[in-house]
């Protein structure tokens, strides 16, 4: 009787171990990459501005690349669409902002640079640099004249590690290696009310 039970536990234990490994892999995948915590828009002096909070989490490979002196560029993609009931939605505006995170060996700190505007800020810790990278305030998004009063508009935002900005050999490696594919889900909200969708 005992032998029969131990035979049944063998396959069951193997299955349980496999499920455990799959769950651990899924958890590890969820723990890295950007995550949009919130995003909203406000109208000020005829312009819609974007504010957002993004958590950037680097995995081991991207962290090693950064510490080796390879800058990481994140592509912030924003789109505004007009929601139409009976026809496909229409894109009204699309904006891309590029932010570069780099390690500075001489100062032993990190630099966050907006590649669109050239603005940059130095930080002594990676935590502070990632926090700065993920704080978007008053980013001009779209002119209010393009938004009609009687229509419904949706905005969406995501953050992606731009593999095209990596050095050549690493770019080739990134093509085959999922560890360099860091991107958030699209975060959607109503342009006027700010309500998440």
Image: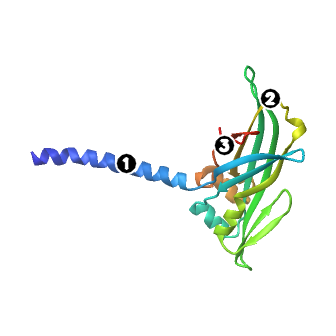
Earlier-in-chain disc, 1 versus 3: 1
Residue 137 location (% of width, % of height): 77, 56
Q: Dot 2 corresponds to which residue? A: 151
Q: Which residue is mark 3?
A: 186
Question: Of residues 82 and 20, which is closer to you in this image?
Answer: 82
Most extreme residue toward the bottom, as rendered?
106
In percent of the image, x 41 and y 52: which residue is there? 21
Query: How far apart are the two marked residues, 1 and 3, measured between alpha carbons?
Result: 31 Å
Identify the coloring. Answer: rainbow
Instruction: Categorize mark 1 by other alpha carbons within 10 Å: few (<14), some (14-19), many (20+).
Output: few
How far apart in space, not on screen, are marks 2 and 3 (Cα)? 22 Å
Query: In the structure shown, which secondary structural element does the residue marked by tag 3 occupy?
Result: loop
Q: Nearer the viewer, mark 1 or mark 3?
A: 3
Left or right? Give the position of 94 relative to 3: right
Labels 2 and 1: the sequence-earlier one:
1
For the C terminus, the image quarter is: top right
Which picture quadrant has residue 115? bottom right
Q: Residue furthest top?
A: 86
């Amino acid at each position: 009787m005992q032998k029969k039970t131990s035979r049944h536990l063998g396959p069951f234990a193997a299955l349980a171990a496999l499920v455990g490994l799959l769950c651990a892999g899924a958890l590890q995948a969820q723990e890295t990459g950007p995550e949009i915590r919130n995003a909203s828009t406000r109208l000020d002096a005829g312009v819609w501005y974007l504010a957002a909070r993004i958590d950037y989490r680097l995995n081991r490979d991207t962290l090693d690349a950064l510490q080796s002196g390879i800058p990481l560029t994140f592509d912030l993609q924003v789109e505004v669409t007009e929601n139409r009931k009976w026809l496909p939605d229409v894109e009204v505006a699309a904006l891309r902002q590029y932010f570069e995170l780099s390690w500075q060996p001489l100062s032993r700190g990190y630099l966050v640079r907006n590649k669109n505007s050239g603005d940059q800020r130095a930080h002594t810790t990676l935590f502070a640099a990632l926090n700065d990278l993920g704080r978007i305030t008053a980013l001009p998004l779209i002119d209010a004249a393009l938004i009609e009063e009687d229509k419904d508009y949706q905005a969406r935002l995501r953050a992606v590690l731009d593999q095209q900005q990596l050095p050549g050999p690493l770019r080739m490696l990134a093509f085959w290696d999922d560890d360099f594919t860091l991107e958030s889900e699209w975060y959607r909200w109503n342009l006027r009310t700010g309500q998440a969708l």
